[in-house]
Image (cartoon, rainbow, N blue to C red):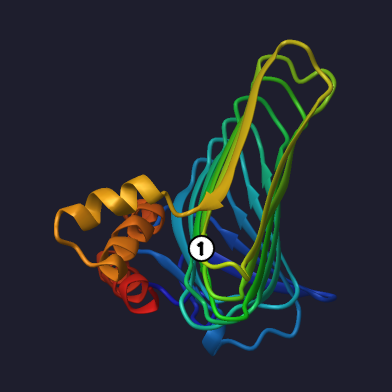
Amino acid sequence: MIDFLNKNIDGISKEKLNNVCKININNNFDDILLINWENLSLDCNLEIIIKENVKIKLLEMGTVKGKCIYRVKENATLIHNFIFLASGGDAFKEIFLDKDASWEGINADLSTENVHFILHCYLKDENSKGYFKLSTLSKNQCKKVFDINFIHETKKTISSMENYGVVQNEASLSFLGVGHIKKGTKSSQARQSAKIMIFDKLCKASASPILKIDENDTIASHAAALGKINDEHLFYLMSRGISESEAKKIITLGYLNPILPHIFDEDLRKSVEKYILERL
């Protein structure tokens, strides 16, 4: 991994203008670019520009107060992992996608603190594509809100969002978000889905996927499912000699483990899997 904010790296230029630290990524990198917010103190907003035809993998550990902007230029690709293992907090992200640009955001949240994660992805030019997938566990007295928005600003753009959550004890979890297909964005597609499993009576959970469609020639869908653990699944596992606590753990893993194949670093993937097992 390359800790590129704290080092001078060939192919990456930096400048600070007013209250914004601008990072230009000009070359492809085989290694993962790392931002570890838990070990970093940043006194300004951050803007990362992925130049034309560049493909990178970016890993962010933890959250930071302040705005982070990512500009993915023409035919560039940003594969983006957000991993919250210990600390939570507030975060505000904006993604801007140019023509033929692609962004894939993966968020694994196993933090033991409150989280308020806001993300706006703007599909600004033709054939831009944005994808987001989240797995989160909220337990004890944690309050977690994920507000994910895709804004289609031109034709032939695609967005997809999948949110999965588990709530235990007296915790709360909210999935918010809007897929907005503006007028004139013909042949665009937007898809949203949200699923939350509730374990205990004092849990609070809500899922509010919203579609705003201002154009007829589009494909759009949304779905939300919220409920307690499936009694039939629980009974089936217990009838096979599995204890109730282990059966609940297996069912919960089914909600959280699907994020693992999308974590691009093997060691980190193992760490996330370990955290999932420890937090259940």
Picture residue at 49% right of the left edge, 83% below the top:
86
On the image, the x and y values in percent for residue 57 come to 43, 57
Q: Quadrant of the C terminus?
A: bottom left
- Seen from the viewer's position, the closer of residues 197 and 257 is 197
- Seen from the viewer's position, the closer of residues 126 and 93 is 93
Picture residue at 66% right of the left edge, 15% below the top:
187
On the image, the x and y values in percent for residue 3 come to 45, 77
Picture residue at 61% right of the left edge, 67% below the top:
203
What type is the residue that disc 1 sits on? Thr
On the image, the x and y values in percent for residue 146 come to 66, 59
Name the element at disc 1.
strand
Q: In the shown orientation, is residue 91 left or right of residue 280?
A: right
On the image, the x and y values in percent for residue 58 come to 47, 61
| Residue 30 visible here | no
Picture residue at 61% right of the left edge, 73% below the top:
171
Q: Quadrant of the N terminus?
A: bottom left
Image position of 7 with respect to 104: above or below? below
To which residue does mark 1 refer? 136
Q: Quadrant of residue 160?
A: top right
- Seen from the viewer's position, the closer of residues 205 and 5 is 205
